[in-house]
């Protein structure tokens, strides 16, 4: 196997381990804390001071069938419209993993609930990981290592040395 292929395979294994380590550091947020997903909770205030990262989980707790957790786009969020929902659940315990950077929008789609404040917008920061690339040589691998944290960079460097 050519060295560049071995480097790519070993780097991918190290990157997977780093991604697993990041996932294990994920935070679980109970939406609305002790009040849960309910009418009368100020979800704008609830998100203040919180940092949401890729891999974190939102847990919505509510009486089943009394509310929904409906994910919608930005325009539908502001219009309190769930007709073009991305997803919807009314099980009483809805878990949402934040899989990408950007803003996610959730409403209760029971008539009148969203308009009195049962809606949540969560802005998810990126996870800081370098993009997934297949290195083709030592120079490319060195440039990728420079974008990673020191622990991952050291592990990737050791794997590259072993491959060469």
Image (cartoon, helix red, strand yellow):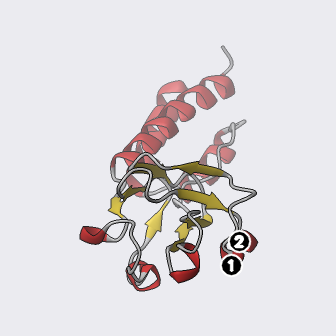
Q: Which residue is mark 1?
A: 78
Name the mark on residue 59: none
Q: Is residue 82 above or below residue 55?
A: below
Callout in the foreground (1, 2): 1
Q: Quadrant of residue 56?
A: bottom left
Q: Is residue 68 left or right of residue 4?
A: left
Q: Is residue 72 left or right of residue 25?
A: right
Q: Is residue 138 left or right of residue 52?
A: right
| Residue at point 59%, 53% (across, down) | 130
Q: Are marks 1 and 2 in contact (CB under 8 Å)?
A: yes
Q: How many marks?
A: 2
Q: Quadrant of the C terminus?
A: top right
Q: Is residue 157 above or below residue 143?
A: above
**Foreground residue among 129 and 151:** 129
Residue 137, position as x, y percentages in the image: 69, 37
**Foreground residue among 106 and 15:** 106
What kind of element bears circle 1? helix
Residue 159, position as x, y percentages in the image: 47, 32
Residue 13, position as x, y percentages in the image: 50, 30
Distance from the alpha carbon under mark 1 to that under mark 2 = 6 Å
Q: Is residue 1 above or below residue 124?
A: above
Residue 14, position as x, y percentages in the image: 47, 36
| Residue at point 35%, 62% (across, down) | 29
Mark 2 neighbour density, 10 Å: few (under 14) some (14–19) many (20 or more): some
């Amino acid at each position: 196997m050519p060295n560049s292929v071995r480097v790519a395979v070993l780097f991918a294994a190290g990157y997977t381990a780093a991604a697993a380590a990041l996932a294990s550091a994920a935070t679980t947020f109970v939406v609305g804390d002790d009040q849960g997903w309910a009418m009368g909770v100020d979800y704008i205030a609830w998100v203040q001071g919180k940092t949401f990262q890729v891999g974190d989980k939102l847990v919505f707790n509510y009486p089943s069938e009394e509310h929904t957790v409906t994910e919608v786009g930005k325009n539908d969020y502001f219009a309190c419209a769930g007709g073009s929902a991305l997803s919807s659940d009314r099980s009483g315990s809805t878990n949402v993993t934040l899989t990408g950077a950007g803003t996610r929008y959730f409403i209760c789609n029971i008539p009148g609930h969203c308009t009195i404040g049962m809606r949540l917008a969560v802005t998810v920061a990126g996870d800081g990981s370098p993009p997934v690339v297949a290195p083709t040589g030592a120079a490319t691998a060195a440039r990728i290592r420079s974008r990673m944290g020191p622990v991952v960079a050291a592990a990737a460097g050791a794997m590259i040395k072993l491959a060469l």
